[in-house]
Amino acid sequence: MNRQLYIETLKPYMKKAGIVLLLGAVIAGAGGWYKHTLSQEKHAQKERAYVTMITAQAQQNAVSLIEESTVRSLTADAIGQEETAIQFREITLRDIARADGKREGKAAKHHREAKNNAGNEITVTPTATASQNTAAAPAPAAAPVPAIAFRPVYKVSCRVDRVKYKLNIDAVSGKVLSIKCDA
């Protein structure tokens, strides 16, 4: 009898707690969706900015880029599928000549910097008198600045059924540079 009274007393509180938990879950879900939508919009703005920037650089360098429709057909040819069967998730334009250094590891950067600075070492030779105690070092030669090449590439992300493909296609020649397949 005590147990029955206990259950009857808690029923209204349990209903209210369930409603509060349900409302909290709905609000949290809506907040997560809103954050996801903002993240997608930010990504889309960034991609549009890249396309605008690289297109302008191509015009400045008098380089003509292939059309996005051509990229779609080259993708279909490269993976051996009909273009209508492919779900294109994203086609972005990037300059891989500038992106290569970003993916380089710390050890490789350190090695490259050490190699570049090897010819710029200053040596001090001791002399017999204190008045002549100066560094006998040649003037450091200016390291040649490598010209930054412009190499626009279309990065294609698509899917056929459950198979995902990622391709890099040269935006000038249309040559397929790489293909990755993930089932």
Image (cartoon, rainbow, N blue to C red):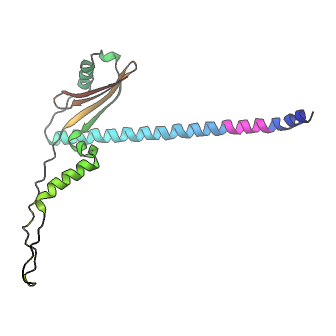
Vertical placement of residue 13 versus 79, above or below: below
Position of 137 with respect to 155 (left or right) is: left
Closer to the camera, 7 or 19?
A: 7
Q: Residue at x 10, y 59 (%)?
A: 119
* Res. 59 image quadrant: top left
Furthest toward the right, the residue is 1
Quadrant occupied by the C terminus: top left
Indicate the position of residue 85 as horizontal and vertical percent values: 34, 16
Q: Residue at x 26, y 38 (%)?
A: 94
Q: Residue at x 44, y 40 (%)?
A: 39
Task: Find out whether residue 46 is within the magenta segment.
Answer: no
* Res. 54 image quadrant: top left
Closer to the camera, 105 or 73?
A: 105
User: In the image, which residues are magenta?
Assistant: 13-22
Task: Count numbered badges in the picture.
Answer: 0
Position of 130 with respect to 165 (left or right) is: left
Vertical placement of residue 34 versus 135, above or below: above
Position of 43 with respect to 29 (left or right) is: left
Q: Residue at x 29, y 41 (%)?
A: 50
Furthest toward the front, the residue is 128
* Predominant secondary structure, magenta span: helix
Indicate the position of residue 173 as horizontal and vertical percent values: 16, 29
Indicate the position of residue 32 as horizontal and vertical percent values: 53, 39
Quadrant occupied by the N terminus: top right
Position of 134 with respect to 162 (left or right) is: left
Task: Find out whether residue 21 is within the magenta segment.
Answer: yes
